[in-house]
Amino acid sequence: METIKLSNGVEMPLLGYGVFQVSPEECERCVSDALSVGYRLIDTAQAYYNEEGVGAAITKSGVKREEIFLTTKVWIANAGEEKAAKSIDESLRKLQTDYIDLLLIHQAYGDVFGSWRAMEKAYKQGKVRAIGVSNFQAARFFDFAHYVDVKPMVNQLQCNVLIQQKDIDPVLDEFGTRMMAWGPLGGQGVDGIVKNKVLADIGKNYGKSAAQVALRWLTQRGIVAIPKSSHKERMAQNFDIFDFSLSADEMALIANMNQHDTGTVNFNDVPFVKYLIETYG
């Protein structure tokens, strides 16, 4: 497994398994399958309501805890210093672990600065190995990162070959922040990646599928990808991407496929933000 090094020196796998929209009932089985395939990065969140399944799968897997990179996220309902601190301890309990490898603020709303203070404290106490944010677009990310003491080590964004998030790259670079891609094979209004002809044609050169090429394009750029599947065979296929490298011409060809710089979810849409805050805040 290839890794990247975060700004604090922590090594993070470039490919992981995400459990967004995996039901609590299915989560333990799915994570167990992912671990047996070889995944060592598991991405969950308080708002996914399946941290218990992740924790149970890891505990029963027989894989050493230090070999697993575990990510979770503080939800809007737990925003603010006091509530975030309690939620971190609750996540640790549900995940059956003494520490979280990467803790993110899930959405850029609510008392994010209060949440960050709680996360900084947890980081300094050793409860968390790295901290970052999720779904912070360029301007919001800059405003946030400019004022906090410990700079975000990761920003998890919707990113794939059709949504390349090019506009935020210079801002992330300024703060030494790495990108983590949710929806690396589509999702949230993005279709056509796994059947894309350009990707499929490139894949023929290596005996790989369009999906494998899409994931390799991300990881070859140093972007962490967390594809999700409930099928073990597809998990294995998604994992099998490190035995080939795309050429410079192929990387450039795929770069020309970009359709969105900031994703299909408009995090500046007032009705959307109002819904999140009024429902969960």
Image (cartoon, helix red, strand yellow):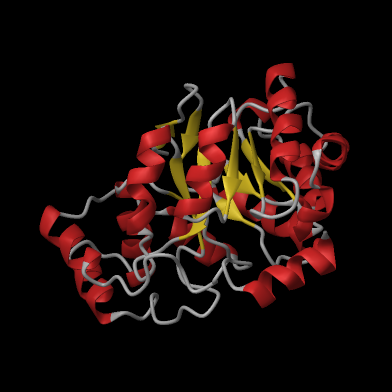
Residue 256 image point, x, y percent: 21, 69
Residue 249 image point, x, y percent: 11, 59
- Closer to the camera, 50 or 189? 189
* Quarter that holds the N terminus: top left
- Closer to the camera, 8 or 274? 274
Q: Residue at x 43, y 34 (%)?
A: 175
Work out whether 255 lies above or below 2.
below
Apparent side of residue 97 relative to residue 40 in the rendered image (left or right): right
Which image quadrant for residue 77?
A: bottom right
Apparent side of residue 201 relative to residue 115 in the rendered image (left or right): left
* Quarter that holds the C terminus: bottom right
Q: Is residue 25 at least partly visible in the picture?
A: no
Q: Residue furthest left?
A: 249
Work out whether 32 lies above or below 233.
above
Residue 202 image point, x, y percent: 20, 68
How many numbered discs, if any? 0
Q: Is residue 270 at least partly visible in the picture?
A: yes
Residue 28 image point, x, y percent: 77, 54
- Closer to the camera, 187 or 231? 187
Work out whether 251 lies above or below 23.
above
Q: Residue at x 48, y 44 (%)?
A: 142
Apparent side of residue 78 relative to residue 108 in the rendered image (left or right): right
Which image quadrant for residue 127?
A: top right
Q: Residue at x 46, y 63 (%)?
A: 184
Q: Residue at x 85, y 42 (%)?
A: 94
